[in-house]
Image (cartoon, rainbow, N blue to C red):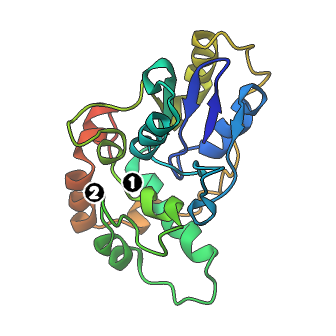
């Protein structure tokens, strides 16, 4: 995540939605540049890279900071692509673990609570399978962010976002970790999985006009 007290913004890092690129673009204007994971969370550094808006709001309250004074930003991405990217990254980082089929893995994930499983401090993995709805709304159905930027619209939306925050326009739109698309969606999804994703991620599919 990134926080600017001067420019009054909070940038949340939604896994596999271009958050690395956003962090790099916002770094020059950030007072808080969090690099640690949940395991290294401490009283001195209460934030961590993939912290959720719910956790952040509570920490702000404990620190006496007004969460509502900050413009809160998060990115999103077509869930059909995001889940593939997460799956491939998990097992790329765990080469000694037998890689299950994408179907078996996806069926066993959740879109809230335990998310993608794994050790608790692997919040990038946990939150990676969260639906955006479960990530940005609290228990009272109050939305905790002000701006959701689609990864697919970075070229158009990032300049607008910088203008809104009264920041100098970026020289170029950074796009990191772009993998080579060697497979088609149909190589991963069958009708059962398509239906599963459509049910679990209905809100964001509908809200941001995503389709298979």
Residue receiving disc 1: 80
Question: Residue at image x 43%, y 57%?
Answer: 127
82 or 212: nearer the viewer: 82
Q: Position of residue 151 (x, y in %)?
A: 53, 37
Q: Is residue 190 above or below residue 134?
A: below
Instruction: Please report contact status of discs 1 and 2: CB closer than 8 Å, yes or no.
Output: yes
Q: Is residue 2 toward the left or the right of residue 70 in the image?
A: right
Q: Which secondary structure, mark 1? A: helix
Q: Quadrant of the N terminus?
A: top right
Q: Is residue 21 toward the left or the right of residue 84 in the image?
A: right
178 or 126: nearer the viewer: 126
Q: Point out which mark residue 188 bears.
A: none
User: Badge 1: how crowded within 10 Å, few (<14), some, or many (20+)?
Assistant: many
Residue receiving disc 2: 197
Q: Is residue 160 above or below residue 41?
A: above
Give the distance between the C-alpha atoms of the residues marked 1 and 2, in whole angstroms. Answer: 7 Å
Q: Position of residue 35 (x, y in %)?
A: 70, 52
């Amino acid at each position: 995540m990134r926080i600017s007290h001067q420019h009054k913004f909070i940038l949340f890092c939604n896994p596999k939605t271009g958050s690395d690129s956003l962090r790099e673009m916002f770094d020059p204007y950030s007072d808080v540049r969090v690099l640690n994971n949940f395991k290294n969370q401490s009283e001195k550094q209460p934030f961590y890279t993939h912290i959720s808006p719910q956790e952040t709001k509570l920490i702000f309250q404990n620190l006496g900071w007004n969460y509502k004074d900050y413009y809160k930003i998060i990115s999103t991405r077509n869930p059909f692509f995001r889940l593939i990217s997460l799956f491939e990254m998990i097992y790329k980082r765990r080469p000694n673990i037998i890689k299950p089929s994408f179907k078996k893995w996806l069926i066993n994930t959740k879109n809230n609570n335990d998310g993608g499983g794994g050790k608790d401090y692997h919040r990038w993995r946990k939150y990676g399978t969260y639906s955006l709805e479960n990530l940005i709304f609290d228990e009272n159905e109050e939305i905790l962010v002000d701006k959701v930027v689609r990864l697919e619209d970075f070229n158009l939306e990032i300049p607008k976002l910088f203008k809104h925050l009264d920041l100098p326009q970026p020289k170029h739109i950074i796009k990191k970790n772009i993998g080579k698309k060697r497979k088609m969606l149909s190589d991963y999804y069958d009708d059962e999985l398509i239906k599963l994703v459509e049910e679990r991620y209905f809100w964001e599919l509908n809200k941001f006009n995503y389709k298979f």
